[in-house]
Image (cartoon, coloured by chain):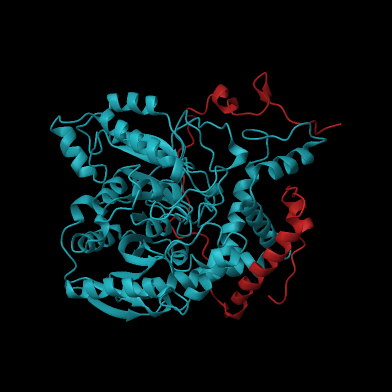
Amino acid sequence: MGKVEIDVAYVAHLARLELNDGEAEAFQGQLDGVLGHIAALGRLDLEGIEPTAHAAPIHNVFRADEPRESVPESDALANAPLAANGLFITPKIVE
Amino acid sequence: MSLPLESVAALRAQLRAGEIRPRDIVAAIRERVEAHNPALNAYVHTDWDAACAEADRADIALPLGGIPVAIKDVIAVRGQPCTCGSGILQGHRSIYDATVIRKLRGAGAIPAGRVNMDEFAMGSSNENSYYGPCRNPWDTSRAPGGSSGGSAAAVAGGLAVVALGSDTGGSIRQPASFCGCVGLKPTYGRVSRFGLVAFASSLDQIGPLAHNVEDAALILGAISGHDPSDCTSVDRPVPDFAASLEGGVKGLKFGVPKEYFIPGMDPAVERAVRGAIDHLAREGAEIIDISLPHTEYAIASYYIIAPAEASSNLARFDGVRYGHRAKDPADVIDCYARTRREGFGSEVKRRILLGTYVLSSGYYDAYYLRAQKVRTLIRRDFDRAFASCDAILTPTAPSPAFRLGEKLDDPISMYLGDVFTIAVNMAGTCGISVPCGFADEGGGRLPIGLQIIGRPFGESTILRAAHHYERTTPWHRERPPI
């Protein structure tokens, strides 16, 4: 974890996040600073240490595979920006 | 009408004696909110008619019968707005109740009003809110803390009896410290997250903010327990927290970690917390020095794990199923990218970028995997410490409430303010903040919080210690000058 530089425009594209004018420059400096701080983790010897994904003493959770009530269609669509015929309307994705 | 809004027990006694009705409590809160919310901006949505109607149906025989609870704007209540303090969810109404809401209602409580927060719970000052900052009732030029700033300001300002908040890196305890109330983050898995809009799923927990430890215990008891709808909720018995408050601190052993008294911390905070430790020793507790050696790495690893999880969780805000959508998109990618530009605020964008970066191809091992390993070391620190003590005493925050605007353009300085709370989330254990004194600042007084950290599922012990501390000190009786 040496010197890092984040390519804000590229990462924003990966995140499907357009930025406002001036944001890319402001974030560049701020995120470089945060990554500089994070680089402190490079000082630790982590050989042989297992990662912790979450703290709960739980590994797998199963339930019986039985049908049960779900969200009614009208509720699922209630907050949709655009909907018709029981469907979410999206921009065209297939030519 | 003036009611004892600072005590669930006192209100319950009046309700049971037939002196007041639940709707009188709602009316008293409404009066306080109408008088003081313009200055505090603690509530972002209220529906007093609905709250009164629900109050009239409340069964006062139940443990929280007739008690209104202010709800952080990140927890779903069917039919009510749930906007997470964000522009992207303007107009959104929940289509179901969170498990904590179902449980509160089952105990007779009334979800009444939605309170302000940093957008998607990302922040330590409540300044990252679409609705503008909430203000600290002790000094309205200062931050109430965050992200549950509205919950803390509403309780401390007397605009709520109790409130629910959520805590991912300190978001219940730090605002409780800044506003002078009690705030408890339960052990990860103690309380269901179903219906809590996810920020960092491996760290988030819902918990109470209250005027006193007993009220926090009552709310915690009502919302705890296994929930099949949250696969990280733990199936183990819920103790009667309110019944375990008595017993004092004699025979309890408290550890004081040297890493939590650092250069640069506010001298008033150090004085107050050292004073609280001495007080507990005089009350019969044993105090020992301990070390949590990886404390200095907690923030760095948190700011990998939390943004990584957030960038994944917030991918769902794409303008298709709910929330804002950009007008006249050229194609679907333009729709996503512009919707998110228009809907999210700066801090959320910063964290999405950071999270996307640390998870991106070629960087995963260097950042996310490494941070998860550091997380193991942080957990081991706590495991070792709890082998020799029952609970850990620390400051909740390194300073009292800072001024609004003071840290807004300096994310690192803002992030470092969470230095004493973040490790508790990383280790997945529980912690409570209780008022332990004041700092004199420019003619006014600002509250300071003592944090008591417990073993995983050791809420009873920290509640008992906090209750004894509260009962033998005057701090919780102080009221802000509003």
Q: Is residue B42 visible?
A: no
Q: Quadrant of the N terminus of chain B?
A: top left
Q: Nearer the viewer, residue B421 or B160?
A: B160
Which residue ends up furthest to the top in the rendered image? A85
Q: Nearer the viewer, residue B170 or B151?
A: B151
Q: Is residue B219 visible?
A: yes
Which quadrant of the view contains residue A77? Answer: top right
Which residue ends up furthest to the left in the rendered image? B17
- Residue A4, x across and y down, in percent: 73, 71
Left or right, B61 with respect to B421, comes to left
- Residue B413, x across and y down, in percent: 56, 67
- Relative to B329, does residue B442 appear above or below in the rendering? below
Left or right, B421 with respect to B218, comes to right
**At 45% from the left edge and 40% from the top edge, which residue is drawn?**
B38
Which quadrant of the view contains residue B459? Answer: bottom left
Which residue ends up furthest to the front in the rendered image? B443
- Residue A79, x across and y down, in percent: 59, 29
Which chain is in cyan here?
A: B
**At 15% from the left edge and 29% from the top edge, which residue is drawn?**
B18
- Residue B297, x across and y down, in percent: 53, 73
Which chain is in red here?
A: A
- Relative to B338, does residue B55 appear above or below in the rendering? above
Left or right, B195 with respect to B329, comes to left
Counting the numbered discs, the total is 0
Q: Nearer the viewer, residue B447 or B418?
A: B447
**At 16% from the left edge and 70% from the top edge, which residue is drawn?**
B250
